[in-house]
Image (cartoon, rainbow, N blue to C red):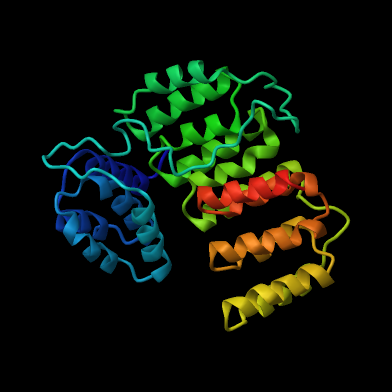
C-alpha cells in the first residue's frame, strides 16, 4: 500500500485543491512538508484557488532550490486561471477536467508506425470523451487510479488518450507509473514520448524516456560516440559563456561527430532558449540517422507555436 507520507500529501493536495485559501494559508500547508517537490505540488495545485493572488510572489520563498521556484513561475506564467471569489472554489485536481490547451497531443488518425499487439483500433473520440466525463474525481488517489486503469485495460487507447487520463492524477509519481504501465497497450507506440509533457519534473521525464528506450530500443542508428566522450561534449557545450557560442559549439559537434539521435536530443536540451533549440533541431536534421522519426524532437519544445514550426519544417523536407 501507499506509505504514510504519500497519504498525508494526498490529503493536503485534496485540501488545497478544494478550498479557497489565502497565500499565507497555502504557504503554511506547503511548509509543513520538508520535501520541496511536495511543496511544489501543493503550490501548483492550490494556485487557482487563492483569494489574494496579488500576494502570490511570497510563495517562492518556500524554495531553497531556484530550479523549483522557476518551474513554478513558468507554470503560473502559462496557466491562466479565473481566481476564486468565495470559499469552496472547486478548481482543484479532483474538480472538473484539466485545461488541455497547453499540451500538444499526437495525431493518431493517420498514424502508420509501430502498433501494439493488443490495441489495433483506438476508441473513437466521442466514446473516449464520454468515458472521461464519467470518471468520479471526488475520490482518493487509489480509487481514482483504479477507475483510470479500468479504462486502460478495457479500451484501445492512443497516446493522446493516455495523456488526458494521466492529467487527472494530481501526483506526478502516479502519472509516471500509469504511463509506464500502459505503454505496451497503447495504439501509436512511436508517439509515446509525447506523453512526457504531462510530467513537470525533469527527473520523472527522464525516468519515462529511459523506460521507453529500454522497452522499445533507443532511437539510434549506426552512429553513437561512447559515453565518456559524449560527457566531454556535453560539458564543452555547457561551458560556453554566451548562448550564440553554445549553439555554435553544439552545431560543430553535430557536424563533426557521428552522434546517435538520443545524443542529438540531449544536445538540444542543453539550449536555454526555445528559439535556439529549434535552430539546432533544424540544423541537425540532415545528420539524423533516422529522419523518419525526427518528429519525436518536437517533444523537446515547450510552446505549441514552436512545435507547429517544427512540424511545418518536417513537412517541407
In this view, the residue in front, 25 or 6, is 25
Q: Give me the residue at 24% from left, 43% from top.
A: 82
Res 146 → quadrant = top left
Question: Is residue 176 left or right of 252 when viewed as pictured?
Answer: left
The residue lying toward the viewer, choosing from 146 and 7, is 146
Question: Is residue 22 shown to the viewer in this render?
Answer: yes
Q: Position of residue 224 (x, y in %)?
A: 83, 62
Image location of residue 257, percent across then percent down: 83, 70
In screen coordinates, is 137 left or right of 250? left
Q: Can residue 207 be seen in this view?
A: no
Does residue 261 lie above or below 181 as drawn?
Answer: below
Name the image quarter holding residue 212: top right
The residue positioned 29% from the left and 28% from the top of the image is 138
In the visual, does 18 lie left or right of 206? left
Image spot of residue 16 (x, y percent): 23, 45
Work out whether 127 lies above or below 4.
above
Q: Which of 315/40 is in front?
A: 315
Please state the horizontal and vertical placement of residue 182, each as a whole percent of the image.
Answer: 59, 32
Quadrant where the N terminus is found in the figure? top left
Farthest-out residue, front: 316
Give the residue furthest to the left. Answer: 86
Residue sitting at x 45%, y 21%: 129
Amino acid at each position: 500500500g501507499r506509505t504514510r507520507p504519500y497519504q498525508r500529501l494526498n490529503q493536503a493536495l485534496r485540501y488545497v485543491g478544494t478550498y479557497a485559501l489565502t497565500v499565507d494559508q497555502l504557504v503554511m500547508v506547503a511548509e509543513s512538508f520538508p520535501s520541496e517537490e511536495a511543496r511544489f505540488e501543493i503550490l501548483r495545485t492550490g494556485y487557482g484557488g487563492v483569494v489574494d493572488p496579488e500576494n502570490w510572489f511570497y510563495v517562492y520563498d518556500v524554495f531553497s532550490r531556484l530550479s523549483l521556484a522557476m518551474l513554478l513561475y513558468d507554470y503560473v506564467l502559462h496557466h491562466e486561471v479565473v481566481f476564486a471569489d468565495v470559499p469552496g472554489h472547486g478548481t482543484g485536481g479532483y474538480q472538473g477536467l484539466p485545461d488541455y490547451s497547453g499540451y500538444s497531443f499526437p495525431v493518431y488518425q493517420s498514424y502508420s508506425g509501430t502498433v501494439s499487439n493488443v490495441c489495433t483500433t483506438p476508441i473513437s473520440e466521442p466514446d473516449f470523451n464520454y468515458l472521461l466525463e464519467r470518471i468520479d474525481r471526488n475520490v482518493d488517489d487509489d480509487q481514482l487510479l483504479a477507475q483510470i486503469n479500468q479504462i486502460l485495460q478495457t479500451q484501445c487507447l492512443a497516446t493522446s488518450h493516455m495523456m488526458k487520463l494521466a492529467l487527472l492524477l494530481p501526483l506526478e509519481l502516479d502519472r509516471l507509473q500509469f504511463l509506464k504501465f500502459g505503454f505496451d497497450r497503447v495504439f501509436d507506440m512511436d508517439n509515446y514520448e509525447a506523453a512526457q509533457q504531462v510530467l513537470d519534473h525533469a527527473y520523472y521525464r527522464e525516468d519515462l524516456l529511459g523506460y521507453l528506450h529500454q522497452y522499445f530500443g533507443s532511437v539510434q542508428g549506426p552512429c553513437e560516440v561512447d559515453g565518456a566522450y559524449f560527457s566531454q561534449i556535453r560539458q564543452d557545450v555547457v561551458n560556453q559563456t554566451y548562448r550564440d557560442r553554445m549553439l555554435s559549439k553544439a552545431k560543430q559537434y553535430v557536424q563533426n561527430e557521428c552522434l546517435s539521435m538520443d545524443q542529438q536530443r540531449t544536445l538540444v536540451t542543453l539550449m536555454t532558449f526555445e528559439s535556439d533549440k529549434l535552430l539546432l533541431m533544424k540544423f541537425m536534421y540532415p545528420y539524423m540517422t533516422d529522419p523518419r522519426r525526427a518528429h519525436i524532437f518536437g517533444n523537446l519544445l515547450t510552446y505549441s507555436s514552436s512545435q507547429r514550426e517544427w512540424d511545418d519544417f518536417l513537412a517541407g523536407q
